[in-house]
Image: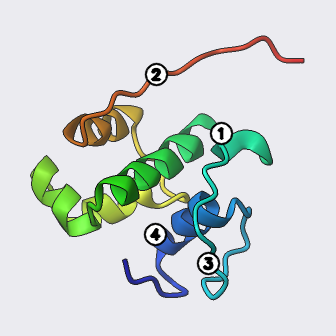
Amino acid sequence: FIHTRNDPFAKVHRIAVTHDPPPMTVNHFQADSGIPFDSFFRHDALTSAKVELYRAMRADGVGKAALGRMLGVALPQIDRLLDLRHASRLDAIERAFGVLGRSMTISVKTAA
């Protein structure tokens, strides 16, 4: 994957790979440590789903264009799906997981 400073996908990459919260810089990528995404930071469900979708794509070697073809949608829709600033619908993310052979579940816990 090629990332630029203005690419919203790069922000997802930074969170998924380095476990760092924004602000985003793209010049200090590290190998994925396998540490669960929320071990250090708590994020809303949508952000977590987007990051996990990105991780699934990386694990399967699927790029944005390939995911778009699999879903039958244009690349800008995939960009929005992975953009942390965009309020994507959870059913769209669930569908993306489905074409990658995964399922998405949501759990609710009592606040501490």
Amino acid under label 3?
A: Phe
The residue that label 1 is drawn on is 44
Residue 29 is tagged as: 3
Q: Quadrant of residue 84?
A: bottom right
Amino acid under label 4?
A: Phe
Amino acid under label 2?
A: Thr
Q: Earlier in the sequence, mark 4 or mark 1?
A: 4
Direction from residue 37 to residue 46 in the image, left or right: left
- How many neighbours does mark 4 have within 10 angstroms: few (below 14), some (14-19), or many (20 or more)? many
Direction from residue 11 to residue 28 in the image, left or right: right
Quarter of the picture containing the C terminus is top right
Check the image and name the residue furthest to the right: 112
- Which residue appears at 24% of the width and 35% of the height? 101
* Disc 3 element: loop
Q: Earlier in the sequence, mark 3 or mark 4?
A: 4
- Which residue appears at 47% of the width and 61% of the height? 83
Q: Earlier in the sequence, mark 3 or mark 1?
A: 3
Disc 4 vs disc 2: Cβ atoms closer than 8 Å? Answer: no
Q: Is residue 5 above or below residue 106?
A: below
Q: Earlier in the sequence, mark 1 or mark 2?
A: 1
For marks 4 and 1, give the CA distance.
Answer: 17 Å
The residue that label 4 is drawn on is 9
* Disc 1 element: loop
Q: Position of residue 87 (x, y in %)?
A: 48, 48
